[in-house]
């Protein structure tokens, strides 16, 4: 889909980072099938967002790390989530 193409083609462009997080927040299934290079890029984007987000930001907003985790959790198994995002989970919680 064109949305998945944004994730794959724009993950190295910082102008698209928040958009990519919002897309994953709205549909975690789009993360499935992303290649290893783009998984690493996404993890970097995600980790940077975790470090930047302020406590006062509502966690229900698209692009908030909690919103991203919830969306991913709906489409990945617990084992996949922990395997791929262990450092991001530790940083968030």
Image (spheres, rainbow, N blue to C red):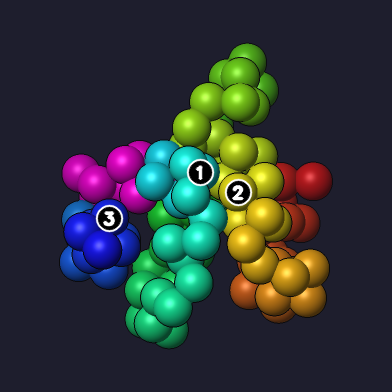
Is 73 above or below relative to 32? above
Q: Earlier in the sequence, mark 1 or mark 2?
A: 1
- Residue at numbered disc 3: 3
- Residue at numbered disc 1: 25
Q: Residue furthest front?
A: 1
Q: Is residue 91 left or right of residue 58?
A: right
Residue 34 picture quarter: bottom left
Magenta span of residues: 14-21
Foreground of the two, 75 or 78: 75
The answer to whether one can see residue 52 in this image is no
Q: CA distance from mark 2 to mark 3?
A: 15 Å
Structural crowding at the residue carrying mark 1, measured as other residues with C-alpha within 10 Å and reported as few (<14), some (14–19) or many (≥20): many
Query: Are the residues at dot 1 and dot 2 in contact (C-beta closer than 8 Å)?
Result: yes
Magenta stretch encompasses residue 72: no
Foreground of the two, 88 or 30: 30
Image coords of residue 79 (percent x, y):
78, 76
């Amino acid at each position: 889909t064109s949305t998945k193409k944004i994730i794959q083609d724009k993950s190295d462009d910082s102008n698209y980072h928040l958009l990519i997080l919002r897309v994953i927040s709205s549909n975690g299934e789009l993360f499935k099938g992303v290649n290893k290079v783009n998984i690493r890029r996404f993890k970097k984007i995600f980790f940077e967002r975790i470090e930047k987000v302020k406590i006062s930001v509502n966690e229900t907003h698209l692009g908030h790390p909690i919103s991203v985790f919830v969306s991913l959790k709906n489409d990945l198994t617990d084992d996949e989530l922990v395997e791929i995002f262990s450092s991001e989970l530790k940083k968030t919680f």
